[in-house]
Amino acid sequence: MRFKTMVVGNGRLQGYAFTAALLWAVLLLILAPGSKGEPAAHPGVDHDPNGAPYVAGELLVAYAPGTSEEAEGTVVRRAGARTLEDLPGEVRLVSFPSIRREASEAARQRVLARELRDLGHKAGVEAADYNYLREPSFMPDDLRLGNQWGLTRARFPGAWNDAKGGGAKVAIVDSGVYVKHPDIGRIIAQRDFVEGDAVADDDNGHGTHVTGIAGALTGNGKGVAGGCFECGLLIAKVMGARGFTTDSLIVEGIDWSVNNGADVVNLSLGGQGDSSVLRTAVNRADGRGAVVVAAAGNEGTRVPRYPAAYSRAIAVSATSADGRLARFSSRGGWVDLAAPGTNILSTSKSGGYDKWSGTSMSAPFVSGLAGLLASQGMSADSIRQRMQESAKDLGPAGYDPLYGHGRINADNAVR
């Protein structure tokens, strides 16, 4: 789903002004039978006590290692549920048909909250969570011409004298990619978790734009340059055409990426719901040596967005061309780094180029830099530390909740 950016008198981007309430109202209108795993396949959206949206009548249940299938089946049957899908890390996606049939959201909320509490205390169950919905953190601009100020401001051209990314793998967990784009190459593996097939075609556009920022081909005389243009790309499609996803799909995408050797996992998506299952997936990727980078969000508030706010994810806020925090960018004590995020020119699913704004665009700059550092043989912890220490301090001296440790400086980082 694409929303045109509104421009007011001072010319600043105001595309983020539509409210979350409107966004989810639109989502409710478009929910209809669809393909495997896509949010559109579910009958509705409900909300937790904090207002975070989740798939109605579904929970994610994480079992302790070694729990037998018989024991799992007993837990599910006694709860009046059925298992829809087995996910990585002993996690199961379960559905409650009777709850889905409840006419009122209040009734569905009340019963599912009770099941959530009860399941969390069952023998063999380590955690139970709502199957939260997440959205991409972007606003497409209708501008199509201009230069790549973001690469220059983040000092990538100088960094390429020392590192180009060869040998490193960057995973883009998003809406897929337009594989025939002349500026997209070096795709070494792809998987569509929405349709359940091996080709991650992008029918939304968000993933293609994000992929170009991180790893568009460079030096080919075409279009744009990517931050880590010699990195191998892993494409995990977890969003459909409507641009929404669920924690169950994201968990699959993260684990697939790491299983395929990702050094960096880019998550230009997020939502308000704090899920222990999603946190565990991020921690698992980090523990296996992958750098997890996530968009801070476009709410313009200090409300944490997940997965960015998890401690083992690198949360990225957005800066504008004047070096200030973009007005739409979320901020808070959980932000780690900042990167350019307004009017960012990159690849589009039409085969051309578009300018978009959002922390979705900021995150792949950081992922591209992480890929350059990974190609130099650095560990995930060392990459995080190097990016923080080499960043350009903005705002108050030292760490602050707007820019974190500062805006990335690729040239400083790779030296």
Image (cartoon, rainbow, N blue to C red):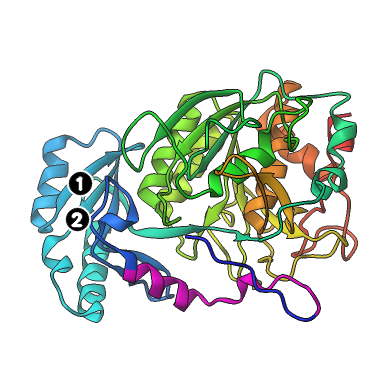
What percent of the width, then of the height, locates residue 337?
A: 74, 52
What percent of the width, then of the height, locates residue 333?
A: 69, 63
Rendered position, 21 above or below 238: below
Q: Label 2 sits on what residue type?
A: Ser
Q: Nearer the viewer, residue 9 or 43?
A: 9
Q: Are marks 1 and 2 in contact (CB under 8 Å)?
A: yes
Rendered position, 162 above or below 329: above
**Residue 252 shown left or right of residue 227 in the figure:** left
Rendered position, 310 above or below 47: above
**Which mark is drawn over residue 84?**
1
Marks 1 and 2 sit apart, C-alpha to C-alpha, by 7 Å
**Which mark is drawn over residue 95?**
2
Q: Label 1 sits on what residue type?
A: Leu
What percent of the width, then of the height, locates residue 35?
A: 27, 47
Rendered position, 299 above or below 288: below
Stretch of the chain drawn in magenta: 10-29
Question: What SS does tag 2 mark?
Answer: strand
Most frequent secondary structure within the magenta stretch = helix
